Image (cartoon, rainbow, N blue to C red):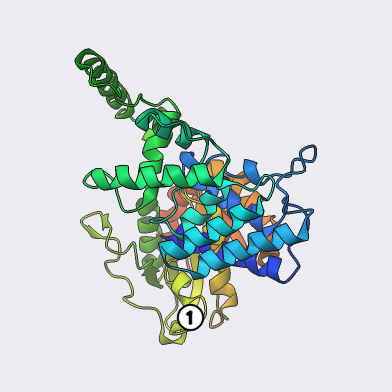
Amino acid sequence: MKNFRSIRRGVQQVAAEIKGDCFGVAYRGSSLETVVHSIAEQRQVFKGADHAFLWKPKLRIPDIYEHPGNQRAFGQLLDACVCCDTEEHVLAEIHRIDALKIKGLGPAVANILYFLHPTITPPSNTAIVRGYNALTGHNVKLGRWDEYLAMRKGLLAFNQRHRDLLSNDLGAVAAFCFDIGAGLYAAPPLADDARARAAWAADLAQVRAQAAKPAPSEADDRTHTEIQGWLRDLGVALGYQVWIAQNDRGRSFGPGRLGDGCLEKLPSAWDGRAGADAVRLIDVLWLDGQGNIVAAFEVEHTTSIYSGIVRMLDLALGGHATELHTLFLVAPDRREADVRAQIARPAFSRIADLSVRYLPYSELQRHREAIGKFGAGMAALDKISHRLT
């Protein structure tokens, strides 16, 4: 949910920039690149989501960079879909953009619309289409809105028939098609052939058994909740009040819950403030005795780094954070390059004015007990983290 909200806000920024005629004429470095890159980070199914938006000079596509009218039409689509909340309205906007026949701007846009309306617009890419065709025997073609809408109709019907196994969120049924289209496993035989179905069931059982084995590179990975628990306990040991993201506090951790012993609500100064809802979703906050937020931590375990940065900005620029000492992005050691790449994006130019640091898991694990026992204030964390801005 955090990432859905952050991507939604990013889409609003893209639409506002296009409306204000300040979007520019390039994808690289734009707010659109930031949003699509964040989408591509979410899950394997979205990998390569930015390909459709990259400028291809020989083909002159997608034609939203050189053609101001097409760019405005694209911005209107995003703006309208951010604001609307009904299937009828969303489909009307899709038909409107389709009627314009903007070269190179096809159903790949559905990957953005999905994060605005996950129960209305399924994502779309080559593997999803291939898997859908294998599953249903249809011949949906990639790259056309009318073909996408036909696939959407079929996915909704399939989803309805198997609601006990799938979800209202169309990302589930799309991911199912993606796995088939990517060759993870085969679709069941379309013909009612007992021998073919038995062979398919045997192959499926083998794939499931293989998938149940943890990947060696992930077997020893720390969990997002565990890192939050470390930061919670360290904050308490240093004498701070601790806030755990409101959607995480009920998670099991140790003998109790992650939110045990933590604040039940943020100081009243945040009530009604712009961006307050996003601040309440920051993974861990440390507050002093006067209720001032002195440190904020976003744990970027596997999720989009972009969304964590957006919440940090909401905190730092939203007022009532005058005592804020440092913003920490806490992530596995191997993600430091990704963190730095995101921080360097033009969309986050304001973050250069803030104190943002990268705290690797290994340093937190190695020193947290000593800091909790002998440390005071924030000085020790500054020494084991790396400055990003």
Which residue is at the front of the view, 248 or 69?
69
Q: Are there few (<14), some (14-19), or many (20+) residues within 10 Å of tag 1?
A: some
Where the C terminus falls, by quadrant? bottom right
Query: In the visual, does 129 lie left or right of 233?
Result: right
Query: In the visual, does 185 lie left or right of 113?
Result: left
In the depicted structure, whether residue 141 falls above or below residue 22: above
The quarter holding residue 202 reads top left
Look at 43% across and 42% down and name the residue there. 151
Which residue is at the front of the view, 100 or 53?
100
The quarter holding residue 355 reads bottom right
| Residue tagged 1 | 292
The quarter holding residue 287 reads bottom left
**Residue 232 appears at what percent x and percent y?**
37, 63
Give the residue at the far top of this rendering.
195
In the depicted structure, whether residue 103 falls above or below residue 245: above
Evaluate whether residue 389 shows in this view.
Answer: no
Look at 76% across and 67% down and name the residue there. 22
Query: In the visual, does 380 lie left or right of 370?
Result: right
Look at 40% across and 42% down and name the residue there. 174
Where the N terminus falls, by quadrant? bottom left
**Residue 180 appears at what percent x and percent y?**
39, 30
In the depicted structure, whether residue 360 falls above or below residue 182: below
Look at 34% across and 26% down and name the residue there. 187
Q: Which amino acid type corresponds to the residue marked 1 in the rendered image?
A: Asn
**Residue 217 appears at what percent x and percent y?**
44, 31
Give the residue at the far front of this rendering.
99
- Number of numbered discs visible in the structure rendering: 1
**Residue 326 appears at what percent x and percent y?**
57, 67
Which residue is at the front of the view, 192 or 119?
192
Q: Tell me the SS state at disc 1.
A: loop
Evaluate whether residue 94 shows in this view.
Answer: yes
